[in-house]
Amino acid sequence: MTTNRNGAGIMRDLGIIALSVLVAVILVKTEALEQLFMSTRHISFLNSFISGFFFTSVFTTAPAIAALAEISQIDSRLATSFFGGLGAMCGDFIIFQFVRDRLSTHVFDLLKIKGGMRRLQAHLRNKYFRWLTFLVGGLIIASPIPDEVGLSLLGFSKMRTVWFLVLSFVFNFIGIAIVGTVARAL
């Protein structure tokens, strides 16, 4: 019975993602974003912040990318990346608070089977493994891939909150700067 619920949940989530991509395409094709952002140019930092906030979730990434690309064409890429990065960092922090403890608990429960816990603890003590986790998680955050996967990796590594915030801001700043650069090149 749980399989049916999980399957229905996955189908619902895929439907929401498809709808999100459709909304992004419509917003770009109708130039609605351009008109909105031109009329609110005096508060472009707020537009960037809000779009950055929505840059983090699997359900809102596509429209946020379209919005950030449009803002980058109208306003400074540096300002768009900075304020968008701050918004994305706030969105990531909210998700991170939920993911960090929940994911770790489930993984540790699974690893209690057949000595997996001892192997995992040995890996977690290895500084190279931690750096690899930070790097892979950060690269996922910087990419257009929704941040939940990268946040799960960072939550699993038990990263301190202050370092998480710095890492989230830096990698989101880079990701949004790349979006803005590509948007201007097209």
Image (spheres, rainbow, N blue to C red):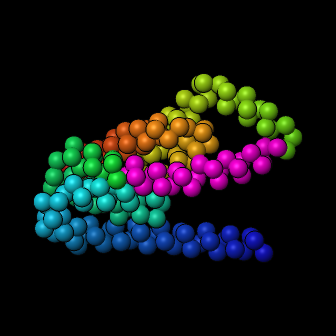
Q: Can you give x and y, in whole percent of width and height, for residue 99 in the image?
A: 58, 53
Taking the spot 54% from the left edge, 52% from the top edge, the residue there is: 97
In the picture provided, is 59 more to the left or to the right than 7?
Answer: left
Name the residue located 30 percent from the left edge and 51 percent from the top edge. 84
**Tag count in the figure?**
0
Instruction: Provide the major secondary structure of the magenta segment.
Output: helix
Residue 117 within the segment the image draws in magenta: no
Residue 77 position within the rendered picture, expressed as x and y whole percent measured from the top left? 21, 46
Q: Residue at x 55, y 38 (%)?
A: 159
Give x and y (percent) for residue 114: 87, 40
Picture residue at 80% right of the left edge, 33% below the top: 118
| Image quadrant in which you'd find residue 125 | top right
> Which residue occupies the foreground of this view, 17 or 90?
90
**Can residue 93 be found in the magenta stretch?**
yes
Query: Which residue is the extreme one toward the top?
Result: 127
Above or below 156: residue 145: below
Residue 13 appears in the picture as rendered? yes
Q: Is residue 122 above or below residue 51?
A: above
Image coordinates of residue 88 in percent, x first then y, are 38, 52
Residues shaded magenta: 88-112
The quadrant of the rendering that contains the N terminus is: bottom right
Question: As drawn, which residue projects farthest toward the right?
Answer: 114
Left or right: 98 as drawn, with respect to 24: right
Can residue 175 be seen by looking at this rendering? no
